[in-house]
Image: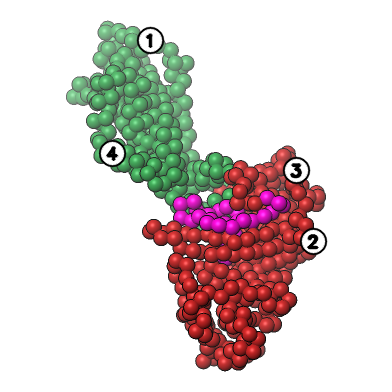
Chain colours: A red, B green
């Protein structure tokens, strides 16, 4: 039962990467204007790795994975550039029919609000079976048996009863577990989790995150986790990417980024995590708002909200520079000479007061 | 813990609805079995027995509702008439539902120019009076049962089209549609397995509601002489001929009218109940 049923056209690429996305650009079209929602994003994923993509609403996190999965609204959005190599094939070059075989079977996805992501007219079991039968030839009875096993695997009590229930009869945490069971039905290599815990309360959140971690450890599934919650990233991810305004502003191992964040935006996000230990009157917020999507800009995207901007930030957009231990940061302060960086860091650890 | 909470819910049918369903089934069953129950030649007549009194006027009369102006038993005629009316309006309803659903799905899924054109056609259709369309078709195609079915189909599709279109616009944004795409389901599969199944309940309710309207439409057309022609019969034809004897033999017009009223009431009341029963909001709340 546990055996991998998916056909693998090729072994993972030689460099050990499961998925390599380069130069991804996705624009939304509105009123004849092109709005860069994703403006040049690179992403790498190794087998069994959990990568977190963090950022405020509207920074392009979801658009990245929706583009990857080919789920963009064809009228409103278009991928302008970029490649995504998965098993030696560019996902973007696949025809819809080939993509249907990758979706769900090799790359599957769970969503933010599990109740609306489940079809209200089918039982939980029907929906798991649909996924299984879409990708594998199997008698219905066996598929049903497998559905029960999957429910057990995601820690749903009395799965024999639950399998015949409708989504609205289950609690939010249960519904998300069902979504995960559906996503895992065909033993995918990559699981994309788009804000999987946002609609759940904190204790259930922790359980779902723990479940994702267990599944990664047991099945070796690589996970792309999209969230705006730094705590979730800290709890689960190996590596993280911080997105702002459609670009990656900082990335690296979670340990490294949490210990030494280099981009002012990342520092702002970390400062905004409420802490029970500190007795602060006012919760820190990054001043300003996520800028509206606009045509490609020449300056740093965080310019308007940054507490430690320098003249150069307004003139030219900084590149994503390589720092030590695989950390990368898109900031002139990190890119500049080491002494200048240190000086600046002292000068303004984000305009707090 | 109540065990039945965990098992699938049953559908309790209230006694009144059950009664309506059973009587409706009995009427439809008797009507459809008319050629078996009372095999007669619809064209045959016997003027020596014309306008005999019904049993409630003359207890010795063998004819429960008397005989009509051509000496034919009214009860037997009623069976045949109901059979015609029901089969024509039901067939018309099926075709109207199919056309309306197909156009609604097209408009809802394609959007853009397709949607504009189909919505325009719907508006055009709704702006032309139904009876007027019936008259035109009767003139062009001749007054036959087929014409009546065609008239029902091409006047009835618009409400289904509107319903399906609006339902699909609601569903298009639904996460579970995106989720099933993410599962690897093809577009056609999503239309049939998810979209159509999700709009099935409102569609069934709409079809039930419309069916009573179609029965009325068939009767109207036949009453006006644009539908079924003698010696064939339908409820509308019977009301039409009975009308001439209203003063002396009022039951000739009242009996078929009563059947029309009873059928429409049964269908509408069951339809109302179905609508409440299948309403997804109420279902989710329970």
Residue found 56% across the figure and 48% down from its top: A121
Secondary structure beneath label 2: helix
Residue position for label 4: B124
Graded by Cα atoms within 10 Å as few (under 14), some (14 to 19) or many (20 or more), the crowding at tag 4 reads few
Image depth: mark 3 or mark 2 in front: 2
**Are the numbered discs 4 and 2 placed on the same chain, yes or no?**
no
Residue found 60% across the figure and 51% down from its top: A92
Residue under mark 4: which chain is it in? Answer: B
Secondary structure beneath label 3: helix
B265 or B211, which is in the foreground? Answer: B211
- N-term-proximal mark, 3 vs 2: 3
**Are the numbered discs 1 and 2 placed on the same chain, yes or no?**
no
Magenta region, residue range: A60-89
Residue under mark 2: which chain is it in? Answer: A
Image depth: mark 3 or mark 4 in front: 4
Quarter where residue A350 is shown: bottom right
Q: CA distance from mark 1 to mark 2?
A: 78 Å
**Res. A218 mark:** 2
Image depth: mark 1 or mark 4 in front: 4
**Are the numbered discs 3 and 2 placed on the same chain, yes or no?**
yes
Residue under mark 3: which chain is it in? Answer: A
B64 or A169, which is in the foreground? Answer: A169
Q: CA distance from mark 3 to mark 1?
A: 58 Å
**Res. A142 mark:** 3
Indicate the position of residue B259 as horizontal and vertical percent values. Answer: 35, 29
Residue position for label 1: B41
């Amino acid at each position: 039962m546990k055996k991998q049923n998916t056909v693998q056209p090729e072994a993972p690429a030689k460099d050990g990467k499961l998925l390599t996305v380069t130069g991804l650009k996705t624009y939304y079209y509105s009123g004849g204007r092109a709005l860069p929602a994703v403006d040049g994003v690179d992403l790498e994923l190794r087998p069994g790795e959990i990568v977190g993509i963090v950022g405020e609403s509207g920074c392009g996190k979801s658009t990245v994975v929706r583009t990857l999965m080919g789920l963009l609204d064809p009228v409103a959005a278009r991928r302008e550039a970029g490649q995504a190599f998965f098993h030696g094939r560019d996902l973007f070059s696949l025809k819809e029919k080939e993509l249907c075989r990758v979706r769900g079977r090799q790359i599957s996805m769970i969503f933010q609000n599990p109740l609306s992501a489940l079809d209200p007219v089918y039982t939980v079991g029907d929906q798991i079976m649909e996924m299984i039968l879409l990708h594998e030839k199997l008698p219905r009875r066996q598929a049903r048996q497998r559905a029960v096993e999957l429910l057990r695997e995601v820690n749903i009590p009395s799965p024999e009863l639950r399998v015949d229930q409708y989504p609205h009869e289950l609690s939010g945490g249960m519904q998300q577990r069902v979504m995960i069971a559906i996503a895992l039905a065909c033993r995918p290599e990559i699981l994309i989790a788009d804000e999987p815990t946002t609609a759940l309360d904190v204790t259930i959140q922790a359980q779902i995150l723990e479940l994702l971690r267990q599944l990664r450890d047991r099945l070796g599934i690589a996970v792309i986790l999209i969230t705006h919650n730094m705590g979730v990233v800290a709890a689960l991810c190996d590596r993280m990417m911080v997105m702002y305004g459609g670009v990656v502003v900082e990335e690296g191992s979670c340990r490294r980024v949490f210990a030494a964040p280099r981009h002012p935006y990342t520092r702002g996000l970390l400062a905004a995590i409420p802490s029970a230990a500190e007795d602060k009157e006012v919760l820190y917020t990054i001043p300003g708002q996520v800028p509206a999507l606009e045509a490609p800009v020449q300056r740093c995207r965080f310019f308007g909200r940054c507490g430690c901007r320098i003249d150069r930030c307004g003139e030219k957009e900084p590149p994503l520079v390589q720092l030590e231990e695989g950390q990368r940061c898109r900031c002139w302060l990190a890119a500049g000479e080491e002494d200048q960086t240190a000086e600046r860091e002292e000068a303004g650890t984000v305009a707090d007061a | 813990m109540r065990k039945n909470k965990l098992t699938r819910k049953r559908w309790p049918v209230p006694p009144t609805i059950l009664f309506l369903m059973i009587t409706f089934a009995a009427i439809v069953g008797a009507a459809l079995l008319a050629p078996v129950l009372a095999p007669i030649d619809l064209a045959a007549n016997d003027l020596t027995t014309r306008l005999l009194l019904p049993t409630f006027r003359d207890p010795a009369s063998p004819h429960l509702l008397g005989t009509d102006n051509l000496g034919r038993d009214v009860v037997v005629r009623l069976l045949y008439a109901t059979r015609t009316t029901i089969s024509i309006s039901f067939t018309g309803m099926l075709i109207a539902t199919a056309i309306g659903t197909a156009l609604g799905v097209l408009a809802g899924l394609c959007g853009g120019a397709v949607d504009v054109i189909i919505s325009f056609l719907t508006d055009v259709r709704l702006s032309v009076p139904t009876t007027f369309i019936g008259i035109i078709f009767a003139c062009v195609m001749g007054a036959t049962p087929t014409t009546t079915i065609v008239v029902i189909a091409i006047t009835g599709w618009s409400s289904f089209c509107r319903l399906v279109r609006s339902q699909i616009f609601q569903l298009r944004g639904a996460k579970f549609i995106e989720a099933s795409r993410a599962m690897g389901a093809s577009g056609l599969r999503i239309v049939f397995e998810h979209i159509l199944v999700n709009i099935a309940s409102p569609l069934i309710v709409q079809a039930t509601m419309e069916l009573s309207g179609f029965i009325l439409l068939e009767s109207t057309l036949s009453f006006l002489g644009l539908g079924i022609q003698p010696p064939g019969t339908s409820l509308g034809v019977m009301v039409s001929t009975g009308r001439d004897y209203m003063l002396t033999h009022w039951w000739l017009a009242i009996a078929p009218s009563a059947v029309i009223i009873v059928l429409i009431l049964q269908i509408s009341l069951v339809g109302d109940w179905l609508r409440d029963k299948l309403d997804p909001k109420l279902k989710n709340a329970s």
